[in-house]
Amino acid sequence: MADPSKILTHIGSALIVIILAGLGANIHLIPSSQNPPPVYDQIFKYVAALVFSFFYLT
């Protein structure tokens, strides 16, 4: 029988985070895009524009 920690190291940390975020959204721990909280509008209005500006400068 394989050691579970060795199996998880082959999957990769990014994939584990994506799977956990998907599970969290499905059980309504993380807000989804269907009914976003008002803070999402502010984030995409100001922060996303600022981040894109930084990407263009590099």
Image: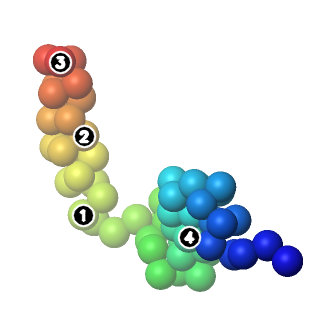
Hey, what amino acid is under mark 3?
Thr
Which numbered mark, 3 or 1, is in the foreground of this view?
A: 3
Q: Position of residue 42 (x, y in %)?
A: 20, 54
Q: Which mark is residue 48?
A: 2
Above or below residue 51? Residue 29 is: below
Residue 16, located in which quarter of the rendered image? bottom right
Describe residue 39's horizontal placement relative to residue 5 as left or right: left
Q: Badge 1: how crowded within 10 Å, few (<14), some, or many (20+)?
A: few
Q: Where residue 58 is drawn, which disc sits there?
A: 3
Q: Mark 4–mark 1 contact, CB under 8 Å?
A: no
Q: Earlier in the sequence, mark 2 or mark 1?
A: 1
Drawn side of residue 3 relative to residue 36, left or right: right
Q: Which residue is mark 4?
A: 20
Q: Residue at x 16, y 43 (%)?
A: 46
Q: Secondary structure at mark 2?
A: helix
Q: Earlier in the sequence, mark 3 or mark 1?
A: 1
Residue 30 image-quadrant placement: bottom left
- Return the disc, 4 or 2, that comes first in the chain's sequence: 4
Kind of residue at disc 2: Ala
Gap between marks 4 and 1, in whole Å?
Answer: 22 Å
Residue in the image at 72% along x and 75% along y: 3
First in sequence, mark 4 or 3: give its number: 4
Distance from disc 4 to disc 3, alpha carbons, whole Å, reads: 32 Å
- Per the image, the residue denoted by label 1 is 39
Query: In x, y percent, where is residue 41?
Result: 28, 54
